[in-house]
Amino acid sequence: MASGKLVALALMALLGCVAGYGSTPSYPPPPSSTPPAAGYPNPSTPSYPPPPSSAPPSSTPPPAAGYPNPGTPSSPPLSPTPPSPTPPPRAAVLKIGHYHKTCYKAEQIVRDAVKKAVYANRGIGAGLIRLFFHDCFVRGCDASVLLDPTSANAQPEKLGIPNFPSLRGFEVIDAAKAALEKACPGIVSCADIVAFAGRDASVILSNGKVNFNMPSGRYDGRVSIANETLFNLPPPFATLQLLKDMFASKGLSTDEMVTLSGAHTVGISHCSSFSDRLPANASDPTSMDAKLAKSVQRQCNKTGDPTVVQDVVSPSFLDKQYYQNVLKRKVLFNSDAALQSPETINEVRLNARISGRWEKKFKAAMVKMGSIEVKSSATGEIRKQCRFVN
């Protein structure tokens, strides 16, 4: 899932699925001293929109829009005051068991679809977790990532550089939605299906250790724009500051960023996403472990853009191994190596050493991420098909 080199979360190219496994997209290789790849701003100089310019201080306050300046002698006195702006529509109120009365088996139906897919191919589970992340970080958790291209919108989110062609799991969402429409027509949103599926995949891949209730009540969005993925999804070459800024823009803390990065313990990545870290640089304390670098370089020397596992120790399990890998420099991305910073290394150590700590924090972070910019009935809809607006 613009010009320049992404200022835009992989979590990270978080998780997707290529050849049956979760993967990061085939990003243009991030440069060191070479010009930035097409489609992304240079990570060292992210091209955030400039803040609005401020007018120089004045002893006379600026006039209200549509009114003469009260400080001008010839101006008549102001009488009517401008009307108060209309408050924005309220976001949906999420709650556990939202469908208990309207579609009692909603979560079970989604769970069954996820189990069927992940038991056949565990990599699909990594794709579903990444799908949830990529949905929530662009326009909020509104299933906008599911929308297919149409004549009215040829470039939806799923065709954005961070998403295409690596994002996977769409067919699982389709299967769950079809079953739900048979059981409870027009009741369960696609956005909630994505959230439930991300939760259920976490349960399966963690062997039940990451099991939690996912609040629901989201509505589906009607807008999906490919270019918005570039400025909302963290790239694999992100610095710590860029990661902090991008997560903070979604209401997530630095600690939650470190926690959600742990999802890189499952799935695979395209070699182009970390080619700037090969070969290992012995003079760089954050460089990739030399043995790992040699191993992945052999795999990456094949034709095309090969993929490698992100966690060489337990690639099919959602566990705290990622943090041990960060400490040992056995991680692929710059965004992973960035967690060796003094600001975040203590959290990495605690997650690596204390049994159950990361799993508990990950559950809470997934729930919080699931509340990002959710739509309500006033701003969204319940789609009949997840790939198209009604």
Image: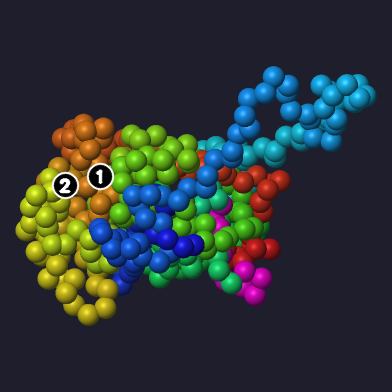
User: Is residue 153 depicted above or below 59 in this figure?
Assistant: below
Residue at position x 16%, y 62% from top? Answer: 278
Q: Which segment is the magenta one?
A: 141-153
Kindly identify the amino acid type of the residue bearing the numbered disc 2: Thr
Please give left or right for residue 301 compared with residue 120 in the image. left
Please give left or right for residue 280 compared with residue 223 in the image. left
Residue at position x 48%, y 68% from top? Answer: 159
Which residue is the site of mark 1? 338
Residue at position x 28%, y 46% from top? Answer: 262
Residue that lies at the very extreme toward the front in this rendered image: 73
For residue 197, say whether it is visible.
Answer: no
User: Tag on residue 33?
Assistant: none
Q: Where residue 82 appears, x then y in whole percent?
A: 83, 30
Kindly identify the amino acid type of the residue bearing the numbered disc 1: Ala
Find numbered disc 2 in the image and state the secondary structure of the residue it sits on. loop
User: Tag on residue 286?
Assistant: 2
Q: Where residue 195 appears, x then y in whole percent?
A: 47, 50
Q: Toward the viewer: 203 or 133?
A: 133
Q: Earlier in the sequence, mark 1 or mark 2?
A: 2
